[in-house]
Image (cartoon, rainbow, N blue to C red):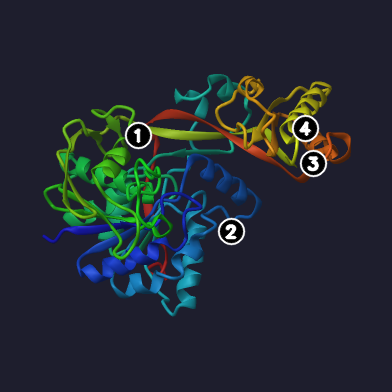
């Protein structure tokens, strides 16, 4: 049986929209079975999608869906490259309809577009009865009604849809590696209790799921870990073999690099226990994995081991959090550092006079912006007399939107009420989302898939 190529066109919502084009060209050039995946869903992304769906029942899926698909859809269909993605987010059916409309525009009417359902448990399960796995218990008890509740599904729905001939498979919340495991299961027809092979394909999915992290993007550190042509970084392609071997490479004629270090870094990314990485389909053990560089930008990965999948599934429940405000103003020229510090002190004093309390932080961008605490202890210990170009940033959290808006007005007021020479004010106020993870028994989850376009007509 031929090996299967699985190319990754995105590693998160908001990723580079042209990345998949080079991947598709490479898959076509290699003339063997291939699948294209897009990993475009995070916990907060899903909650924001649910809010968008609440406002408009035709929204709630990945906003960049048409942008990433339009340039490559025709080529994928012509060369029999299925597309699998979680860009359905909170509304996979609406995403399917949007893709169907795009297909009709490109004279591709009748595509077999499938959606995987069952992850949305908001109205189906009593959240309060579930065990909290990770997160703030006080938040879960006092945050009010959740705005989204989604369980991490596995790969079975994806595999079944592909085995039935689906050309595009859209999911909501699935475990990230399931986007790769599903195509591998459909191609090789492994048993769902073939734990080592499931583990191998899950590891392949884990290596692909963050896009260019494994090809040098997030890896790069100039002078220490140099990566060529990073502006043209290629996205990864995994070659999965029937025996579970994996070769990690990247799109042809692109920048970036695939080497032992990039693969090691991504393999360990977000792994809580290397010997017991729990996914919906298998418990992955990478403690005995071996990796070898076999050619430039090609690394072979072997030795993944699997154990029976856990009895429970992870569910992420999202609640509305505090309102968040961010305001900035710049100071430049002689004594800019001292003027910016005075402006920061003014904002601190104004915040203390509010009727409603708020949490706030003041940073001097150009001096310190990440490593300090909310109390600004590091900032106060640093010299200001040599700073001639600095931007003051105020960040505010509060339950009441009006409180946050008031502090943004205070940033704007610095134009005349603050030190001399302030300019370039920018403010924003937005809601925030907080999440809590639960464990849910498998028998409470009803996963299914169906055609929404093409075959259903």
Q: Secondary structure at mark 1?
A: helix
The percent position of residue 420, horizontal first and vertical second, equals: 84, 38
The percent position of residue 391, horizontal first and vertical second, equals: 69, 39
The percent position of residue 191, horizontal first and vertical second, equals: 16, 46
Q: Quadrant of residue 343?
A: top right
Instruction: Give whichever of discs 3 and 2 has the lower sequence position.
Output: 2
Cα separation between marks 2 and 4: 49 Å
Q: Secondary structure at mark 4?
A: helix
Instruction: Give whichever of discs 4 and 1 has the lower sequence position.
Output: 4
Residue under the point 32% across and 69% down: 25
Compared with 113, 246 (above or below) is: above
Q: Secondary structure at mark 3?
A: loop
Q: Are marks 4 and 3 in contact (CB under 8 Å)?
A: yes
* Residue 55 seen: yes
Cα separation between marks 3 and 2: 44 Å
* Residue 167 seen: no
Instruction: Give whichever of discs 2 and 4 has the lower sequence position.
Output: 2
Label ID, residue 339: 4
Residue beneath label 2, please?
Answer: 58
Q: In screen coordinates, is 26 left or right of 367?
A: left
Q: In screen coordinates, is 287 left or right of 270?
A: left
The N terminus appears in which quarter of the rendering? bottom left
């Amino acid at each position: 049986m031929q090996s299967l190529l699985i190319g990754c066109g995105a590693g998160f919502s908001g990723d580079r929209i042209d990345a998949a084009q080079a991947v598709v060209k490479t898959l076509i050039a290699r003339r063997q079975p291939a699948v294209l995946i897009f990993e475009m869903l995070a916990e907060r992304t899903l909650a924001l999608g649910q809010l968008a769906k609440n406002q408009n029942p035709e929204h709630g899926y990945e906003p960049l869906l048409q942008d990433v698909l339009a340039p490559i859809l025709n080529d994928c269909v012509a060369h029999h490259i299925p597309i699998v993605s979680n860009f359905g987010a909170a509304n996979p059916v609406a995403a399917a309809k949007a893709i169907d409309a795009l297909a009709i525009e490109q004279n591709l009417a009748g595509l077999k577009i499938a959606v995987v359902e069952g992850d949305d448990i908001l109205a189906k399960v009593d959240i309060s009865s579930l065990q909290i796995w990770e997160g703030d218990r006080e938040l879960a008890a006092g945050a009010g009604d959740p705005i989204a509740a989604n369980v991490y599904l596995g790969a079975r729905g994806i595999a079944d849809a592909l085995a039935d001939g689906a050309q595009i498979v859209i999911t909501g919340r699935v475990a990230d590696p399931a986007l790769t495991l599903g195509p591998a299961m459909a191609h090789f027809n492994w048993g769902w209790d073939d734990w080592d092979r499931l583990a191998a394909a899950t590891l392949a999915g884990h290596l692909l799921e963050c896009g260019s992290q494994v090809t040098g993007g997030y890896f790069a550190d100039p002078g220490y870990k140099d990566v060529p042509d990073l502006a043209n970084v290629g996205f990864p392609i995994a070659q999965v073999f029937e025996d579970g071997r994996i070769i990690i490479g990247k799109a042809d004629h692109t920048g970036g690099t695939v080497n032992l270090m990039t693969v090691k870094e991504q393999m360990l990314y977000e792994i809580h226990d290397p010997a017991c990485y729990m996914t919906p389909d298998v418990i992955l053990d990478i403690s005995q994995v071996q990796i070898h560089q076999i050619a430039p930008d090609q690394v072979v990965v072997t030795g993944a081991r699997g154990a029976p999948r856990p009895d429970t599934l992870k569910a992420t429940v999202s609640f509305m959090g505090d309102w968040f405000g961010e305001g900035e103003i710049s100071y430049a020229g002689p004594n800019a550092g001292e003027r910016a510090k005075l402006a920061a002190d003014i904002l601190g004093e104004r915040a203390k006079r509010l009727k409603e309390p708020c949490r706030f932080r003041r940073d001097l961008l150009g001096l310190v912006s990440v490593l300090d605490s909310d109390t600004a202890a590091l900032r106060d210990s640093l010299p200001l007399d040599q700073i001639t170009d600095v931007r003051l940033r105020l960040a505010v959290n509060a339950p009441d939107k009006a409180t946050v808006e008031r502090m943004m007005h205070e940033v704007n007021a610095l134009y005349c009420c603050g030190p001399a020479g302030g300019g370039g004010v920018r403010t924003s106020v937005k809601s925030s989302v907080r999440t809590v993870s639960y464990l849910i028994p498998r028998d409470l989850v009803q996963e299914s898939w169906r055609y929404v376009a093409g075959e259903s007509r």
